[in-house]
Image (cartoon, rainbow, N blue to C red):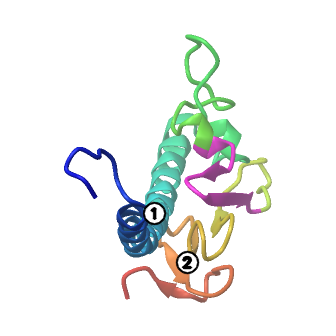
Amino acid sequence: MKGTDKGFSLIELLIVVAIILIIAAIAIPNFMRSRLAANQASAVQSCRTINAAEVTYLSTFSVGFSSTLLQLQPPAGNAPPTSAAAGLIDTALASGTKSGYSFVYVPNSPDSTGSYQGYTLNASPTSPGLTGSDFYYTDQSYLIRVNHTTAASSSDSPLGS
């Protein structure tokens, strides 16, 4: 090359592209693992939030636990909280999907007064292996249980044990 030529040769550009691809090959899996871990942490925190909301709902409205997650969402506009819209969780969580996890809430059968005295909550990754790898379960005992392969239940190990 002459000293007056400007620009890069094809070899120099290929070397730069190869270096970028090597860096991407290292960074992308780490990013995916961190996103998966963040989704799982969010799912556990969402289970805790729902448990706390249920305790508040039970003590505030004196009608037992809620019959759906939608009863825990904020009321419309500036309306005051009611047992139909208690304002205890955000609308995303009340919809049943948040941060790569779906939440299935099922109240126990109502008692003779029509009040629900128990519930179960399952949190499952929307795309197992991509959005999360653990499955969570909780109920009115407020203990969160985990299963690493399939939907968690009351017979699984408590989280952290």
Q: Is residue 155 above or below residue 69?
A: below
Q: Which residue is drawn at the image coordinates 61% and 89% (left, top)?
A: 155
84, 147: nearer the viewer? 147
In this figure, which residue is indicated by the disc labeled 1?
35
The percent position of residue 139, horizontal first and vertical second, equals 58, 67
| Segment colored magenta | 93-108
Q: Classify mark 2: helix, strand or loop.
A: loop
The percent position of residue 95, horizontal first and vertical second, equals 69, 43
Mark 1 touches mark 2? (CB < 8 Å): no
Task: Give the mark, 1 or 2, whose residue is nearer the N terminus.
Answer: 1
Q: Which residue is drawn at the image coordinates 45% and 74% (left, top)?
A: 29
Amino acid tagged 2: Asp
Q: Is residue 156 magenta?
A: no
Q: Which residue is drawn at the image coordinates 43% and 79% (left, top)?
A: 159
The percent position of residue 160, horizontal first and vertical second, equals 37, 82
The percent position of residue 64, horizontal first and vertical second, equals 63, 48
Q: What quarter of the picture does the C terminus occupy?
A: bottom left
In this figure, which residue is indicated by the disc labeled 2?
134
Which of discs 1 and 2 lies nearer the camera? The answer is: 1
Q: Is residue 78 above or below residue 143?
A: above
Q: Quadrant of residue 34?
A: bottom left
